[in-house]
Image (tube, rainbow, N blue to C red):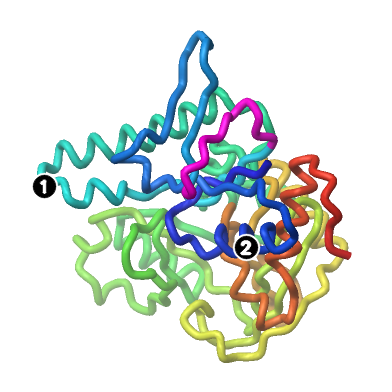
Amino acid sequence: MILTVSLKDDLHALAVQHEAWRRGYRDFHILECDQLSGRQSLSWHSHGGAPTTVLTSDGTEVNLEEAPLIWWRRVRAPQKASEHVENEFERNLINNDCRGALTGILCAAFQGEWISHPEATDRASDKLYQLAVAKQAGFRVPRTLVTQSRDEVVAFLQQVGRVIVKPVVGATGPLMFTQRIEDATSFQAESFAACPAIYQEYIEGSEHIRLNCFGDRMYAALLKTDQLDWRADLTFPISKWTVPEETAKKVTSVLQRLGLRMGAIDIKLTPSGEPVWLEVNPQGQFLFLEPLLNMPLGELFLDFLLSAAGDHTAPMT
């Protein structure tokens, strides 16, 4: 059995479930974490006496003691039912308690394999922490400043030259693209003081790597573009990229130190070909590369889940 925790209508969860069903593997379930409110979705007893159960998207009641693997895909979203609650306190209570109960029950009762464990996923999502870990693993990383001081940003620009800015965590809503900052003095000091941001050395070059790790298997794409943030446009050349052995060793070391079983990693190659670590998303998107690379990533990812779950269903060759 594979239990996926995600949002309603999450493309990746549905696509991998569809592939499982296509193979005749029906024991692939999705627990929609934003659909807990309004129905009896969870049940846990501290001293036993009854099984710990969760309700899946198709109404199946899953006994957690019988589940060998959880794919911890997407978990931070408000309850759909709470959107109709006008009182802000009540809405926050519903959202916080649904999220807290789900995470707490799964961590308390589930004894199988995580892809990846909630604690590791949360820790690895910290861009600053993962940057430090990548540096320890031997990667070159961009010189980075986190501050609320305009003066410090001005000094940083003078020190490193070209600088980009991006959020430390970000927020739900419109996608926030990485931007260059040319002249910090053109902005009010209050804009910098509003909240910390990541100011980072710009890495020269036009070759970007998106490296997807499923366990010990790596599937990488080379994206050639002068755009600072390639997510805004995918019409440039994209091809398969063979991961050099030394880079693969460093990537493996980073993921092991972070406690991750998978990850979508962004690397940039300098004009001389040196790989520079940018960041890892513990549950990043990978299916967008499937048609661009003519590579069955959804099928390969299902193979990874089945293997991690100890299922003997024949994998793809």
Residue under the point 43% across and 31% down: 42
Residue in the foreground of this view, choosing between 183 and 220? 220
SS assignment at label 2:
helix
Q: Where is residue 283 in the image (x, y as percent from the top left)?
A: 57, 55
Q: Which mark is residue 18?
A: 2
Q: Residue 86 carries which label?
A: 1
Q: Position of residue 274 (x, y in %)?
A: 74, 72
**How many circles with numbers are drawn on the protein?**
2
Asked if labels 2 and 1 touch by Cβ distance under 8 angstroms, the answer is no
Under mark 1, the amino acid is Glu
SS assignment at label 1:
loop
Residue under the point 71% across and 53% down: 25
Query: Would you place residue 121 above or below residue 155 in this image?
Result: above
Residue in the foreground of this view, choosing between 160 and 280? 280
Instruction: Report the span colored magenta.
Output: 57-68
Q: Is residue 53 left or right of residue 139?
A: left
The tag earlier along the polypeptide, 1 or 2, is 2
Quadrant of the rendered structure where residue 207 is? bottom right
